Image: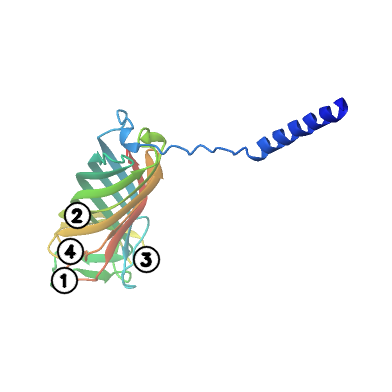
Amino acid sequence: MKKILTLFVALASMTAVMAQDSTTTTVTTKKKKKDWSKVKLSNRPNDHLMFQLGYNGWSQIPDTINTKGLSRSFNAYFMFDLPFKSDPRFSVGIGAGVGTDNMFFDKTEIDITGRRANTLGFRNVADTNHFKKYKLATTFLEAPVELRFVSNPENTNKSWKIAVGGKIGTMMSASVKGKTWQNRSGNTINAYTLKEKSKRYFNSTRLSVTGRIGYGALSLYGSYQVNAFIKEGFGPDVRPFQIGLTLSGL
């Protein structure tokens, strides 16, 4: 009888343990969502300088216009950064600065003052005397605006960054410069340098869309002018664009 009772107690104990194991539930703790509105931004700069160096090109350029070499752009802006209080990963950047473009041409002469006709003429001078180096230089006073995102607003120097926006500019100067006078065979005649200035055939206002993506202080940037570079009816409808590198705190 004792043996039967002992066996019964053992079976009952095993059944209770098995039942307890079968009813045990796994409790998963939900990861707490970070409250971005409470992050500290003491190490984040509120204003900074932004420098851009890139390639300058023209879209919709006619085949009759011959460009040459690596045309360049250089921009320098002083920017203010305005983070969103609810989520400082997002911010608005506004500023002001200067944008300069240099476009180089091959065996081409630009009638920037309109001496021959009341247009901005591009003349192919490959079959006659011409300048070895020839460029069109423009300078704009610009005001950029950006919507920005940083993956780590507490340490922007170690953060992925994206920015989209635009800029409006007003033309300060436009000029052509030719150096080293040559004959049609490419032989140097003399070291003559030509400089001419005129803004009359260019749109004084520039409207561009912009974008940047990068990590830390370096990023790739691009911009495209959405309005005509040359006044309608006075030259080809080209649209300048730039692609290059940005050095910036944000």
Q: Amino acid at mark 2?
A: Ile
Callout 2 environment at 10 Å: few (<14), some (14 to 19), or many (20+)?
Answer: some
- State whether residue 158 appears in this view: yes
- Residues at badges 2 and 4 in contact (C-beta under 8 Å)? no
Q: Looking at this rendering, what residue extends furthest in the top direction?
A: 2
N-term mark: 2 or 4: 4
How far apart are labels 4 and 3 at the CA level? 26 Å
Q: Which residue is mark 1?
A: 119
Q: Amino acid at mark 1?
A: Thr
Q: Quadrant of the C terminus?
A: top left
Using the image as rendered, state which of residue 97 and residue 28 is in the foreground. 28
Quarter where residue 184 is shown? bottom left
Residue where numbered disc 2 is placed: 168
Q: CA distance from mark 2 to mark 1?
A: 25 Å
Front one among 236 and 44: 44
Residue 66 in the image: state x and y as whole percent.
Answer: 33, 67
The three-letter amino acid code for the residue at tag 3 is Ser
Relative to 102, is 160 on the left or the right?
right
Which sits earlier in the primary sequence, circle 2 or circle 3? Answer: 2
Q: Quadrant of the N terminus?
A: top right
Q: Earlier in the sequence, mark 2 or mark 1?
A: 1
Contact, mark 1 vs mark 3 (Cβ under 8 Å)? no
Residue hosting label 3: 185
Are there few (<14), some (14-19), or many (20+) residues within 10 Å of tag 4? Answer: many
Instruction: Say what secondary structure mark 1 lies in.
Output: loop
**Residue 133 visible somewhere in the drawing:** no
Q: Label 4, on which residue?
A: 112
- Image position of 39 (left or right of 198): right
Mark 2 or 1, which is nearer the eye?
A: 2
Q: Earlier in the sequence, mark 1 or mark 3?
A: 1
Going 82% across and 28% down the picture, which residue do you hit? 5
Residue at screen point 70% across, 34% down: 16
